[in-house]
């Protein structure tokens, strides 16, 4: 059997790993580097670049260079999150027919799934070059707080990339596997995961090889990008005051400032000041203008301190949900590049009254855990390792007066299944509508609509007589499935599904075919 790889598809960087002799190892990309920028660029000559090559295009070709696509996976164009992101990115977004967000490259609208697929296909190619064989199976990680749409979109992206996803696993859970596997420990750990775009906190109990998630919480729109944006705002506001020039509309200048901001932010994890030096940032009638500013660690902390504070209510909620408290946590694992920021480490240490574990590489640990999970799934782990994860959001249906009735509570161990009985309210009613949602609000409209299911072809009967059992299931990937059976006849009940978001299986197949055709054409061109 060919190798199965573990992929951490990150907002800003991605990483791929495999297991060798029971040890997780990172597979270098085609440039020999352990992580790859999650960036895709579409050049004027029709080329598609991924990773560092794409990142290099960001300054000269900003409107066709797509970064942080993970923030848009499974999202609606109109959502406040997407509308917020839209103001800060150099590429253009548009709405699909079903309201999903899409990226506009030249005059072509591309789904976030397809763009993510290009990153995944590149990582697949790196692994294939490394092993000299075709790779078709992977475990892919997602932020723990990803909802059903975001998980499904990730899985579709992998399918488009030619990967069969053995399992979708939560990033913090994956990190805990990599941390705890060889230690034979009995501990409760907190995994604080802050990457480029998302924040998650997960509390895990590790007991004799059983990894049991107790609770998870987080925000899929809080991450390193927000820290970068604060620096960008600081630089542009000062520039505007000094020169009366607004750089907000200058995509090229903004991209240069953003890159310099991110670089300075990284440096400030190890130094106390860093210079942002951008000559010829713009020119007006009088002269060329330059940016030369010193950013100190103190100033960075001032600009971003509230973003760090925003993570603590999520930690408190997760502790409450797990019936735990800071003093009951044995170790804190930091995951995601942004967790290198000294103020985050300090605040975490203060909160838990304990220093976080230092020796782990926050960029690689998630991919490493994913390849361990792939090995568990293949039955290759000699020691007993059991992974019990939880669902991050409650699942339920819309009931009278637009209320939301929970069927499966958040933090329930997955896979899980609950059945509810439905009946008709009118004589000879042939269909019953079920609106399925995810979230915590008491009202349906404030939660995430997953799909509307119509139970159709119900046998003619007086009101209240038919009994249809509807099963709501969350599988090991955290994905929702609904099935129904007519109790009176014992037959499975037909369901018509109208998904609120995402690609249909037919659309995924069409995209796969289109990209296979494009590959074939490219091959012909190459050999012509
Ligand atoms: P990830 O999604 O885990 O790859 O995390 C990427 C995020 O971590 C980006 O926002 C980076 O800017 C940030 N990051 C990486 N290294 C550092 C560092 N040394 N200090 C602060 N942030 C960092």
Image (tube, grey):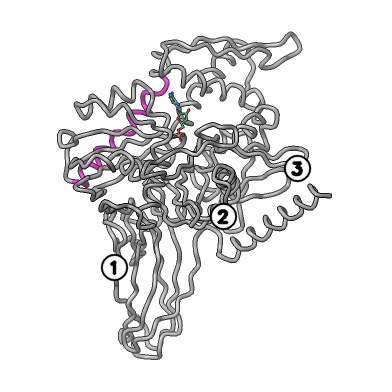
Q: Earlier in the sequence, mark 1 or mark 2?
A: 2
Instruction: Tell me the SS state at disc 1.
Output: strand
Determine whether, in the image, residue 6 is placed left or right of residue 108.
Answer: left
Front in this rendered view, residue 285 or 373? 373
For marks 1 and 3, give the CA distance: 50 Å
Residue indicated by mark 2: 99
Which label sits on residue 43?
none
Q: Which residues are magenta?
A: 303-322
Residue 509 spot, x, y in % from top left: 61, 63
- Chief secondary structure of the magenta portion: helix
Mark 2 and mark 3 lie on one chain; the one further toward the N terminus is 3
Q: How many marks?
A: 3
Please tell me how crowded label 1 is: few (under 14), some (14-19), or many (20+) other residues with Cα within 10 Å.
Answer: few
Residue 381 part of the magenta-drawn span? no
Q: Nearer the viewer, mark 2 or mark 3?
A: 3
Q: CA distance from mark 2 to mark 3?
A: 28 Å
Residue where numbered disc 1 is placed: 418
Q: Is residue 151 above or below residue 252?
A: below
Compared with residue 297, is residue 184 higher up or lower down, i.e. above or below? below
Residue shown at the point (73%, 14%) measured from the top left: 284
Q: Is residue 313 magenta?
A: yes
Q: Position of residue 31 (x, y in %)?
A: 59, 32
- Quick one: SS at disc 3? loop
- Residue at the spot of label 3: 46
| Mark 1 vs 3: CB contact within 8 A | no
Number of residues whose C-alpha sits closer than 10 Å to that of mark 2, classed few (under 14), some (14–19) or many (20 or more): some
């Amino acid at each position: 059997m060919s190798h199965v790889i573990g992929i951490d598809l990150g907002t800003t960087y991605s990483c791929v790993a495999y297991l060798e002799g029971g040890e997780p190892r990172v597979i270098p990309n085609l440039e020999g580097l352990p992580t790859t920028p999650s960036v895709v660029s579409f050049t004027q000559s029709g080329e598609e670049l991924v990773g560092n090559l794409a990142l290099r295009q960001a300054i000269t070709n900003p409107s066709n260079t797509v970064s942080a696509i993970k923030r848009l996976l499974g999202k609606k164009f109109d959502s406040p999150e997407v509308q917020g992101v839209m103001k800060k990115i150099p590429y253009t977004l548009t709405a699909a027919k079903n309201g999903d967000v899409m990226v506009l490259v030249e005059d072509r609208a591309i789904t976030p799934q397809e763009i993510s697929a290009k990153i995944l296909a590149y990582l697949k190619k790196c692994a294939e070059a490394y092993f000299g064989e075709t790779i078709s199976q992977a475990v892919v990680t997602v932020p723990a707080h990803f909802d059903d749409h975001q998980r499904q979109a990730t899985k579709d992206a992998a399918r488009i990339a030619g990967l069969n996803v053995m399992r979708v696993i939560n990033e913090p859970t994956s990190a805990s596997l990599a941390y705890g596997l060889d230690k034979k420990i009995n501990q409760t750990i907190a995994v604080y995961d802050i990457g480029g775009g998302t924040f998650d906190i997960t509390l895990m109990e590790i007991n004799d090889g059983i990894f049991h998630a107790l609770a998870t919480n987080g925000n899929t729109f809080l991450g390193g990008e927000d820290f970068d944006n604060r620096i960008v705002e600081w630089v542009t506001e000062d520039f505007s005051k000094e020169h009366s020039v607004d750089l907000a509309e200058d995509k090229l200048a903004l991209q240069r400032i953003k890159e310099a901001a991110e670089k300075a932010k990284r440096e400030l994890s190890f130094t106390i000041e860093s210079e942002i030096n951008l000559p010829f940032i713009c020119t007006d009638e009088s002269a060329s203008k330059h940016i030369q500013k010193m950013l100190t660690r103190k100033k960075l902390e001032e600009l971003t301190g509230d973003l760090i504070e925003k993570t603590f209510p999520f930690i408190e909620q997760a502790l409450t949900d797990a019936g735990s408290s800071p003093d009951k946590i044995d170790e804190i694992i930091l995951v995601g590049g942004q967790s290198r920021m000294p103020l985050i480490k300090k605040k975490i240490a203060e909160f838990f009254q304990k220093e976080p574990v230092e020796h782990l590489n926050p960029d690689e640990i998630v991919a490493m855990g994913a390849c361990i999970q792939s090995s568990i799934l293949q039955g290759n782990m000699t020691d007993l390792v059991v992974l019990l994860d939880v669902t991050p959001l409650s699942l339920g249906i819309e009931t009278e007066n637009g209320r939301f009735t929970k069927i499966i509570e958040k933090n329930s161990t997955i896979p899980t299944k609950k059945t509810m009985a439905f009946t008709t309210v009118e004589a000879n009613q042939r269909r019953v509508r079920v609106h399925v949602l995810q979230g915590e609000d008491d009202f349906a409209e404030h939660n995430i609509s997953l799909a509307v299911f119509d139970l159709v072809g119900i046998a003619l009967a007086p009101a209240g007589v038919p009994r249809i059992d509807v099963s709501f299931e969350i599988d090991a990937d955290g994905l929702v499935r609904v099935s129904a059976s007519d109790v009176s006849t014992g037959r499975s009940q037909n369901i018509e599904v109208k998904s609120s978001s995402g690609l249909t299986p037919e659309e995924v197949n069409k995209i796969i075919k289109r990209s296979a055709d494009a590959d074939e054409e490219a091959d012909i061109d190459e050999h012509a």
